[in-house]
Image (tube, rainbow, N blue to C red):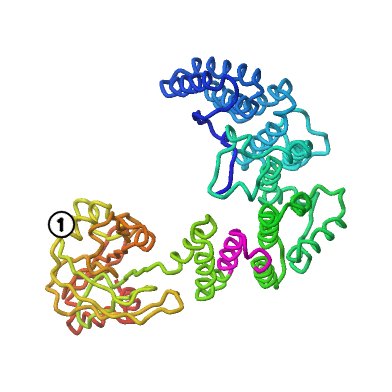
Amino acid sequence: MKRALNLLAFTLMMAAHSSPGASQRDDLWNQATNAVQKGLPQTALTNLQTIIAGALKDKAYPEATKAIAEKIMLEGSIQGNKPEEKIVRLEAEMARAPKEMAPVMETLLAHWYWQYFQQNRWRFMQRTATAQAPGKDFTTWDVPRLFAEIDRHFQQSLAAEKTLKATPISAWDDLIEKGTMPDKWRPTLYDFMAHEALAFYTSGEKAAARPEDAFDLPADSPIFGPAAEFLAWVDRLAGETNAAAVRALHLYRDLLRFHQNDPAPRPAFAAADLERLTWGWNAAFGEDKNARYKAALEAFVRDHADLDISALALKREARVLQQEGDLVAAHELAGRGTNLFPNAAAGKLCRNLVLAIEAKSAKITTDRVWNAPWPKITVRYKNVDALYFRAIPMDWEMLLRSNHYRAESLSDAEGREILAKAPALAWSVKLPPTPDFKEKIFEVDAPDNLKPGYYFIAASHDEGFGQKGNLLPMGDVWWSVPDDEENQAQGYMVSMADVWVSDLALITRERGGNIEGFLLEANSEFGPWISSSLLPELASLF
């Protein structure tokens, strides 16, 4: 996860400040947080106003920006939490804020407009553009007009390009939340804000304005070419359109130009280039898109083999192979990234993918009623070479009263309780291997030596049924997760099915709001005939 603005929702958080007078404001931040928790918003606002005045005096602009945004969010929560009101308040604050705060506040304002669209998407989708120029009330705008406003604020946020490029991202740690990816990939405030704008331009939501600014990105274009070829191509693109794709192309070009003369090994240049390739894969069209993307990623790994971001490129190529169904190749690539940079964030992402591909799974389905001729148990599984079964007898009437007589309706606690019971029968089967990591289907004979009654059939690839771990319900499946990290990713899976072992068969139908039925001996000559292909004809006689 990369850095993100920490003010898209209202959360008062303590931060370590390094500006003069910061220690005094730390206490004020604590007081504001406590006031909010105690339901005293006016007290919190008073503290925030004092923080803003002190931070502006000390030129602690990140802290001041954060306090202003927190104040606006808190005022909104007091007065009904309408998203349009916080936009109006932020615009008023921007009019009197120092110019050093303007770029980040413009980005925050663009985000809030974007949030307003997302929260009211259904309203905007019902509006049509009018010939009359829209007024100042943005709540009445159509989608193209609102997106043009968002675009305007993102463009204004990047206008102070020279200052932003000279500002280390760490200078705004008070406002911008750290992520797991290293700052060397986006080292300046310009990098951060350019990617904030790219999040909008590459989101696909501007498709609502497509008739006015359409731009198609073919896969055979230089979008997947070497960086130099890509830069020359973007320079030739028409600059007068504000199509989202063109905005994105220009921003990727500007980021690459900004970092192309960085001292080797240029991690920020490589990071921007990889993001360019990945967006191209998401946005381009053409039958050879996957092939060109994979070739570009392989070239990227060769060119940046000494950088840990090459592991991220390996992981992304592996994801494409995974989607194409080549899990063996995907596993190999992700394993390479894991081995090359095991301690880097990108290497850990590769490790996660390796574990996901290697994950064991097994789920069973079977007939609800068992009798001769005995049915099969269908097993869907992968990465499992043996499956262990338990037939656990249950009290039908008790389960019927609880309305939890089906495996899929059991709670976590009920699943634990059932697995703790002594089984009437336990057995295991060997499964054909799955060297391709893909799910296979295998049919197992149901046991023919269970006494008549109601059972839960439990199946797990762990002989102990993961009883040392925590059971997490997922429909008719529970994951038992042990304590160690490796097995935590793998998990122990328990699948259940409820069955009746009975010599009786019940044939039902609904007529006139009533349920009618026949109770038959399943193993009689009449029973099997009832369940044959003649059943529809027989049912039509009633």
Question: For residue 323, which quarter of the picture?
Answer: bottom right
* Mark 1 closeness class: few <14, some 14–19, many ≥20 residues within 10 Å: few
Q: Residue at x 49, y 30 (%)?
A: 13
Q: Nearer the viewer, residue 248 or 158?
A: 158
Asked if residue 30 is positioned above or below residue 375 in the image, the reply reads above
Residue range of the region highlighted in magenta in the rendering:
302-320
Q: Would residue 349 appear left or right of 176 to someone viewing this image?
A: left
Chief secondary structure of the magenta span?
helix
Q: Which amino acid, by three-letter code, is at mark 1? A: Glu
Residue that mark 1 sits on: 397
Whether residue 125 is visible, yes or no, is no
- Label 1 sits on a secondary structure element that is helix
Where residue 130 sits in the image (x, y, percent)? 79, 39
Where residue 250 sits in the image (x, y, percent)? 79, 51
Q: Would residue 413 appear left or right of 343 to someone viewing this image?
A: left
Q: Nearer the viewer, residue 108 or 353?
A: 353
Whether residue 116 is visible, yes or no, is yes
Q: Would residue 467 appear left or right of 46 to someone viewing this image?
A: left
Residue 316 is inside the magenta segment: yes
Work out which quarter of the rendered image holds the C terminus and state it.
bottom left
Q: Would residue 388 appear left or right of 338 to someone viewing this image?
A: left
Q: Nearer the viewer, residue 181 or 362?
A: 181
Asked if residue 477 is positioned above or below residue 534 in the image, the reply reads above
Furthest-front residue in this view: 263
Furthest-bottom residue in this view: 525
Q: Residue at x 42, y 74 (%)?
A: 439
Where residue 238 sits in the image (x, y, percent)? 87, 53
Residue 262 is inside the magenta segment: no
Where residue 177 sits in the image (x, y, percent)? 56, 39
Q: Nearer the viewer, residue 211 or 15?
A: 15
Asked if residue 83 is positioned above or below residue 35 in the image, the reply reads below
